[in-house]
Image: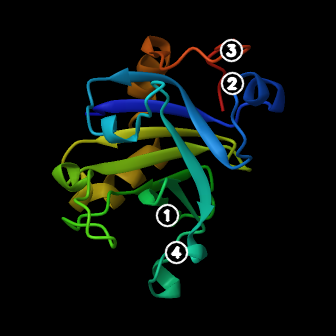
Amino acid sequence: MIAGYYKLVALTDEVKAQNKIKSKARLDCISFAGTYKGLTNFVNKQGQLFFYKTPCREFVEAQSKRTAEWSLTNSSLNFSSIYIEDFDFLEYGYGYPNAKPRLSNGEPNPLHPFKNDGYLFITNKDYTQIEVLIISDGRNLISHYYQHLIDGYFDGEIQRLRADAKPFYEYIGFENANSKL
């Protein structure tokens, strides 16, 4: 059911310095598993996949009941907001891509071909580690999948994906221990 798994982490200051990364809000993909191809537009020319942890209030225009606290962005593109509905399970969230065919600057939206996908997120308390689970064509049922995540329905599949995950990029000075959240 899960088409893609991506583990994002905030690298240590030492590893960031060795790799010439300046942003404190950047989360880099250290490992991945699955067959999902929808994130290729987020990979830079060095082969790194990363997002910035951005407060939603900086750019999201929505009713306060629908606004998430955090979003994952890359350049000017919002990959997804992270919505949390069950405050007993703050480590689990969901989201989905922007479905508009064009961005606010008039450019084609690189996520538009994947507009029907849904995202599940597993985070730690300070959002320095985020696991992204992609559900192809899961947008319309993402709250249902979110509840399944909370209920443990995906636990076996997530464990398999974690075990099968390969490094996404070899960062200088970083040992990918595939640590748990």
Q: Earlier in the sequence, mark 4 or mark 2?
A: 2
- Say which quadrant the N terminus sits in: top left
Dot 4: what SS?
A: loop
Q: Which residue is mark 3?
A: 172
For marks 3 and 2, give the CA distance: 6 Å
Left or right of 15 in this view: 144: left
Q: Earlier in the sequence, mark 1 or mark 3?
A: 1
Amino acid at pointer 2: Asn
Amino acid at pointer 4: Phe
Figure quadrant of residue 139: bottom left
Disc 2 residue crowd, few under 14, some 14–19, many 20+, Cα 10 Å: some
Disc 4 residue crowd, few under 14, some 14–19, many 20+, Cα 10 Å: few
Q: Which dot, 2 or 1, sits closer to the camera?
A: 2
Q: Is residue 149 above or below residue 59?
A: above
Q: Which residue is mark 2?
A: 19
Q: Which residue is mark 4?
A: 59
Residue situated furthest bottom in the rendering: 63
Q: Position of residue 34 (x, y in %)?
A: 32, 23
Q: Earlier in the sequence, mark 1 or mark 4?
A: 4
Front position in the image: 175 or 171? 171
Is there a contact, CB below 8 Å, between mark 4 and mark 2? no
Res 119 seen here: yes
For marks 4 and 2, give the CA distance: 29 Å
Q: Which residue is mark 1?
A: 83
Q: Residue at x 16, y 50 (%)?
A: 113
For marks 1 and 4, give the CA distance: 15 Å
